[in-house]
Amino acid sequence: MAYYTSPLAEALAPDLLARFDRYVRIDTQSARDRTRCPSTPGQLELAGLLPNELEDMGLADAGVDENGYVTATLPAGGGGHADTVIGLISHMDTSPDAPGAGVVPIVHRAYDGGVIELPRNATKLDPATEPHLASRTGHDLVTASGDTLLGADDKAGVAEIMAAVAHLREHPELPRPTIRICFTPDEEIGEGATLFDVDAFGARCAYTMDGSSLGEIQDETFSALGATIDVTGVDAHPGFANSILVNAARVAARIVAALSQDGLTPETTTGRDGFIHGSSTRSKRSKPRVCNRSASRSAAGPTARS
């Protein structure tokens, strides 16, 4: 039997799961090289679905703006203060770092604490390497099928808010203030708040439903700056490279290594310690030079981005 924190949680679970299952099947991966908002059309698909569901609940002002931000208002009820406005926020996009199309959610009822073998790519979830699984023994778990993201970050938050709004709408006697709802695009690429209209949202404060442990509320966030370093090497055929070739990939690796000293990386810091995080490198190839000996390219390419 699955564990629930309260009778209300148990009552809401079927609706929550149905919504989550529906949302994760929509590919909403964001794209790092954003040229528009949202950065991918899949986010607009989910952004078009959610206002329809909110309207079906009776939220008359539900809509999506030209940048893909979904907003709606749940009026105060049960004698709550209508002039007090509290926000609930989650993001619709999923990470671009792993496949997000063709998600097939699988529900593992009353998890027994053992290894979970997923049907695709021979993927396994093993408590020996993922210790947090042990604390979920007896719970119902939801996973992907093994070759995609699940998208719980943050469609679990989207489903939580939608299920909560549906319940509150069905029970107007429950005391509550005015609740403003917003589902944002492109959070995974650091752009979720870029075009968020704080004044139009109009909330005194807001809670973001995204992560954390059961019962935990986080009241602060980190701040970070990003940098892109372009390294341009010198191309030469490997057979004639002596004193000519400058391998951009190796130069980029030296830069990353220099920034990854102990005490400066996420895995060696904690609390409010600062760190430098080299997140990705990629090669860019320019047009090959043609000379009288060879038109071949070096294996590494002339340019690397870190």
Image: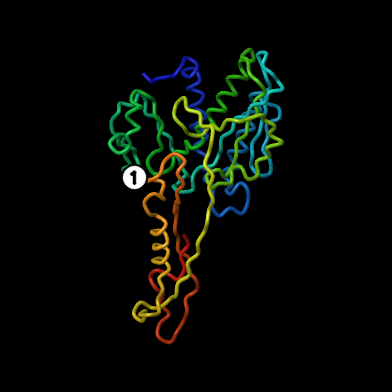
Which amino acid, mark 1?
Answer: Asn
Q: Nearer the viewer, residue 156 or 265?
A: 265
- Tag 1, which secondary structure? loop
Q: Is residue 26 left or right of residue 203?
A: left
The residue sitting at 54% across, 44% down in the picture is 223
* Of the pair 221 and 263, the residue shown nearer to us: 263
Q: Few, some or many C-alpha atoms within 10 Å of disc 1 (few <14, some 14-19, many ≥20)?
A: few
Occupied quadrant, residue 120? top left
Q: Image height check: is 284 above or below 187?
A: below
Q: Residue at x 63, y 18 (%)?
A: 176
Q: Is residue 242 left or right of residue 31?
A: left
Residue 246 x %, y %: 41, 73
Q: Is residue 9 above or below residue 271?
A: above
Q: Quadrant of residue 46?
A: top right
Give the mark count. Answer: 1
Left or right relative to 256: residue 32 = right
Residue 306 pos. (x, y %): 46, 59
Q: Nearer the viewer, residue 167 or 245?
A: 245
Which residue in the protein does label 1 denote? Answer: 121
Residue 157 location in percent, x, y?
52, 32
Examine the rendered structure and indicate whether residue 42 appears above or below residue 257: above
Q: Residue at x 50, y 64 (%)?
A: 230
Of residue 21 and residue 38, the one placed in the foreground of this image is: 38
